[in-house]
Image: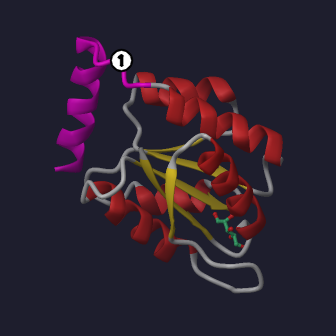
């Protein structure tokens, strides 16, 4: 599995902790975010990560800003992206299982490192259920997008 990860200036430290954790799990990361001490605008990081996911270069994306909300709003403007802003394990798991979300967003000012790692584990370890009732609803979302 390969993951594209991005952040703004609110989250470079948490991004690095997430990358370390993913590497320990044997998951390759492409870092599209800004470094400690840099300022950057979250829509640009969202665009860079989402392009990697939509092109198929990466399987999933992770976006971290202050709240996760700005990142999720920006990411969901990209065709083919289903981004979920989560702060609990259950939602991060279910958004893979039911929504086939391909980008996880969270806020470095909302969750601590322990919860962030739990969210990432739930997201990357859970496959899409591929059940007919869920696919029908995802197809309706795609209709809205089109
Ligand atoms: C940046 O200060 C902040 O607005 C951003 O990280 C994010 O929380 C936006 O949704």
Q: On the rendered structure, is 17 left or right of 31?
A: right
| Residues drawn in magenta | 127-146
Q: Which residue is mark 1?
A: 129
- Which residue is found at the position 27% from the left and 30% from the top? 138
Q: Main secondary structure of the magenta part?
A: helix
| Residue 66 seen | no
In magenta stretch: residue 142: yes
| Residue 54 seen | yes
Q: Nearer the viewer, residue 17 or 53?
A: 17
Above or below for 65 versus 102: below
Q: Nearer the viewer, residue 127 or 103?
A: 127
Q: Where residue 70 sits in the image (x, y, percent)?
A: 57, 62
Q: On the rendered structure, is 131 left or right of 83?
A: left
Q: Nearer the viewer, residue 88 or 145?
A: 88
Q: Where residue 23 sits in the image (x, y, percent)?
A: 60, 50
Q: Where residue 84 sits in the image (x, y, percent)?
A: 51, 42
Q: On the rendered structure, is 62 left or right of 114?
A: left
The quarter of the image holding the N terminus is: top left
In magenta stretch: residue 118: no
Q: Picture quarter containing residue 100?
A: top left
């Amino acid at each position: 599995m390969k993951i594209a990860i991005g952040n703004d200036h609110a989250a470079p430290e948490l991004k690095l902790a997430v990358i370390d954790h993913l590497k320990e799990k044997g998951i390759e990361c492409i870092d599209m975010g800004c470094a400690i001490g840099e300022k950057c605008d979250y829509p640009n990081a969202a665009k860079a990560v989402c392009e990697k996911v939509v092109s198929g270069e990466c399987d999933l994306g992770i976006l971290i800003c202050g709240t996760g909300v700005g990142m999720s709003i920006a990411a969901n403007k990209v065709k083919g992206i289903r981004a979920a802003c989560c702060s609990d394990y259950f939602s991060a798991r279910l958004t893979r299982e039911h929504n086939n979300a391909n980008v996880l967003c969270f806020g470095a000012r909302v969750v601590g490192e322990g919860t962030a790692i739990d969210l990432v584990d739930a997201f990357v370890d859970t496959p899409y259920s591929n059940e007919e009732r869920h696919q029908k609803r995802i197809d309706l979302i795609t209709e809205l997008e089109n």
